[in-house]
Image (tube, grey):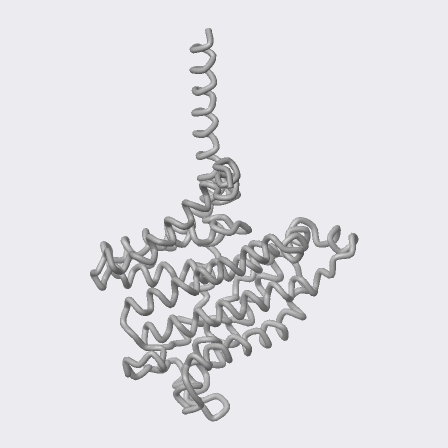
């Protein structure tokens, strides 16, 4: 194989992605302080959730502001499955994903008849309904949920119980992030991805040319729900606690959406980029300012969202691409000018 063909097959962006992946896998070996590994785990789980939300919110253009409900369902099902003695939380995690898909199918039927703001508000309404059910009852189907007190997960330290050190959780979530990016890329480059793009642009026109709009929106919602639920199960076992205020909170759903939109919804790397940048800023401010971070973080996200919508609708990722292309153009222009001077 010639060097030219090899260069065409291995693009610079592929080399960059491979280098970042290697660096991510080596991170816990390089930075051994538990505090920094914990921050990395938190940021990675938000990268994962933002990428999962991007399937319905970015590719399909359906701004589901209450999709955090699937995180809560996945978390509670995994914990209760193990607590009641049915089996390992790993099995409960998959079961939580399946139940989330069923729930998504049921609630999406009426929600998808709505558009725009009404669709977003309907998803928020379902989130609050489920949260109040969990808060209002100490048990569901005979299983103890402890209402608003939540469930403390006993520490056993066994991987069968989805419990291991911070380094173990880091690698589990990193692998999950890689998998969701692979799934997202497959969707994005497939027939389904093109159909979702058409639906996002104009549902009426997409339906007119023969695209089954309800079917593909439902597929995107179910895939997103399943992935969000898996992340919820792993996250609460990392915290050793599941509470309706945390996993069914509206703030969580909103934060995931904001990370995705600011990073660049509808792109493969935008949600990851947004969650990395804002997640690190959020954790840094939280450490520096303590309990004062809550109102400051909300204000910061609001200002950042306004600026992105006004000056860079494609998000930080697209803005970065534009800057890189501009730099490349300037360098290319300088090279051509240098060649002209040398020829003269």
Image spot of residue 30 (x, y percent): 24, 56
- Identified at 63% across, 55% down, the residue is 190
Q: Is residue 150 visible?
A: yes
Q: Residue at the spot x=63%, y=66% of the render?
A: 219
Residue in view at x 38 percent, y 60 percent: 44
Front-most of residues 146 and 95: 95
* Picture layout, residue 266 above or below residue 251: above
Residue placed furthest toward the top: 344
The extreme front residue here reads 1
Q: Nearer the viewer, residue 152 or 310?
A: 152
Horizontal and vertical percent position of residue 81: 44, 86
Count of residue discs: 0
**Residue most extreme to the bottom:** 142
| Horizontal side of residue 196 vs 28, given as left or right | right
Furthest residue in direction left, as rendered: 33
Vertical position of residue 320 compared to residue 104: above or below: above
> Does the rendering let one see residue 149?
no
- Give how far across and how far down residue 51 sits, in percent: 48, 58
User: Can you give x and y, in whole percent of width and height, for residue 38 in the image?
Assistant: 28, 63
Of residue 339 and residue 218, the one placed in the foreground of this image is 339
Q: In the image, 171: left or right of 62?
A: left
């Amino acid at each position: 194989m010639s060097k030219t063909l090899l260069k065409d097959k291995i693009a610079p962006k592929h080399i960059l992605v491979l280098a970042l992946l290697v660096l991510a896998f080596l991170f816990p070996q390089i930075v051994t302080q538990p505090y920094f590994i914990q921050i990395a785990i938190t940021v990675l789980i938000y990268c994962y959730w933002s990428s999962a939300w991007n399937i319905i919110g970015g590719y399909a253009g359906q701004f589901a502001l209450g999709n955090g409900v699937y995180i809560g369902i996945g978390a509670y099902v995994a914990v209760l499955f193990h607590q009641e003695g049915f089996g390992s939380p790993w099995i409960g995690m998959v079961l939580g994903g399946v139940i989330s898909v069923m729930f998504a199918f049921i609630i999406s039927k009426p929600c998808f008849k709505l558009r725009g703001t009404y669709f977003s508000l309907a998803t928020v309404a379902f989130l609050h309904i489920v949260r109040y059910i969990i808060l209002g009852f100490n048990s569901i189907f005979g299983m103890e949920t402890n209402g608003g007190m939540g469930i403390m997960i006993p520490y056993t330290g066994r991987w069968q119980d989805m419990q291991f050190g911070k380094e173990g959780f880091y690698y589990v979530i990193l692998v999950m992030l890689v998998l969701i990016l692979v799934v997202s890329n497959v969707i994005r480059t497939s027939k389904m991805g093109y159909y979702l793009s058409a639906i996002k642009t104009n549902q009426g026109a997409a339906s007119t040319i023969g695209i089954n709009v309800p079917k593909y929106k439902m597929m995107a919602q179910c895939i997103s729900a399943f992935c969000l639920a898996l992340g919820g199960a792993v996250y609460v076992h990392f915290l050793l606690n599941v509470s309706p205020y945390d996993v069914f909170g509206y703030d969580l759903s909103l934060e995931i959406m904001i990370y995705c939109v600011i990073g660049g919804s509808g792109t493969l790397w935008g949600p990851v980029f947004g969650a990395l940048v804002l997640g690190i800023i959020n954790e840094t401010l939280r450490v520096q300012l303590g309990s004062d971070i809550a109102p400051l973080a909300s204000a910061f996200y609001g200002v950042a969202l306004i600026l992105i919508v006004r000056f860079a609708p494609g998000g930080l990722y697209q803005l970065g691409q534009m800057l890189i292309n501009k730099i490349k153009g300037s360098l290319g222009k300088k090279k051509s000018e240098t060649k002209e001077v040398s020829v003269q």
